[in-house]
Amino acid sequence: MFALVFFAIIFVAILYFLKFNKSSRELEHIPYVSALPVIWALFRNKPHDEIQDIVRKSSKGHDIYLSKLGPYVSLNIASPEYAKDLLMKSEDIAPKFEYRPGNVLYDFFGNGMVFSNGDKWRTYRNLANPAFNLALSPEMVGETTMDLFSFIQQNLNRPIDIFEVMQRTTIEVLGKLAFGYKFGCLESEETPHIINIYKFIISTVESVYRIVFPWISNLPTEHNKKFHRAIKEFDEFIFDIIETKRNKIKNNSEKYTNNGRVDLLTSMLELSEREGIHTDTKQLRDEMVIFFVAGHDTTSMSLSTSFYYLAKYPEMQEKARAEVISILGNEPVIPTSDQLKEMKYINAIIKESLRMFPPASGLSFRTLEEQIKIGSHVIPKKTLCTVNIWQLLHDPENWENPSQYNPERFLNNKKRHPFSWIPFSSGPRNCIGQNFSLMEQRVILSMMLLKYNWTLPKNSINKDKLMLEAQFLLRPVDLKLIFTERN
């Protein structure tokens, strides 16, 4: 019975993708690349790097091509110059594609900053900008890293899952930054209930089957019912935090939190009150969800990549540690912003980790509101466009030996196209938390280098290469490291 269902799904998928018709004669000069090899690889749970190899092979070297993944025909861009032509367009000319209720992305993310457009996007971006600028002080991250030390002390000299540990760490940083809330992820090895709820939600949102066949999400299945119950519970958690903040601001009972620092939510509420801007509770919830995902999963992946390669290449770890000691001394301390700027090799490690394994391998769709030119190509209005970040970051024309981990490439002053390294996107819709994420990674990595040595276990499945899960947000498979305290 299972085999019949499986082959029925595959048959429907083939018919579904064979229905492709070019939506406009103006796009006939753009090559069409079948997504079937990619879909087949996704259904077989191939790791993301292998899927990207299939993408490159299927596209036959084309830097711009049409393809169909799920119900949408999209223009795919895999060249820095073409990416620049799209991403530097005004947010009103190339706005984000807006999903509708019933799509898993809309059901969870709503109209948060990554998906909203126009005045709504501008309003909440302007409310969040000052808070992120204030948050660039390393102290909050350093305090959480001290808590991380206490957590690791209980697990010394035995393999621990570094990605899970980094998730625990970044969620605590996020709690302080966004909500002024302590999750307690570093107080015990038990995962807080609300984090388990979040993990179930995000695993559903990332489901390949729901992306390729979005109508699955509307079926009256037990999983779909559980998904919507989980969202409701997660929403209640966020709504409660928002209303608590509103009441405290109204009563002036707790204007500042986190040792005098104002969290992101409080800052947005206070600024909106001063400017006379109405902040909708549901919209604030959508923004907090975006911050939750962007500040949690993505930074965890980048940090885990850096820890992995420093374990794999001990000479790099020693070079990085020597730089940190020369700047901070030999004892674990919280670095200042000026000291972080001196850490050239640490910064190169982080940039190379983001190049090798960008946490988000592709940008969310843009829908053109006007005809534009991308290179010599005239792209008509209403075309759906996306940029393959992974392909840009592994393009051999800009990156020598792109599959090799080499932080030195960011220290040799070699000129590259400015859009060849855009893990946080670029242009007016770039990631608002980019500078905070980079600062957070520098603080955690430098402090950990002063406190610990770490190695790969001898039987690690990641001994030869970093194994990735078959997810759209990149995650490592069973990435365990052994930490020992430095003498």
Image: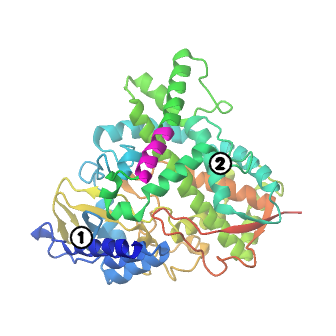
The kind of residue on which mark 2 rests is Ser
- Closer-to-camera residue (108/355): 108
Q: Residue at x 46, y 66 (%)?
A: 421
Residue labelled with disc 2: 337
Q: Position of residue 347 (x, y in %)?
A: 61, 62
Q: Residue at x 65, y 68 (%)?
A: 479
Q: Residue at x 32, y 71 (%)?
A: 9
What is the spatial separation of the Cα atoms under label 2 and label 1, in whole angstroms?
53 Å
Tag in front: 2 or 1: 1
Left or right: 448, with 243 as reference point: right
Q: Is residue 245 at all visible to an observer of this figure?
A: yes
Residue labelled with disc 1: 16
- Closer-to-camera residue (128/33): 33
Which residue appears farthest toward the front when viewing the image? 1
Residue span colored magenta: 222-234
Q: Identify the disc placed on residue 231.
A: none
Q: Position of residue 12 (x, y in %)?
A: 27, 71
Q: Quadrant of the N terminus?
A: bottom left
- Closer-to-camera residue (422/213): 213
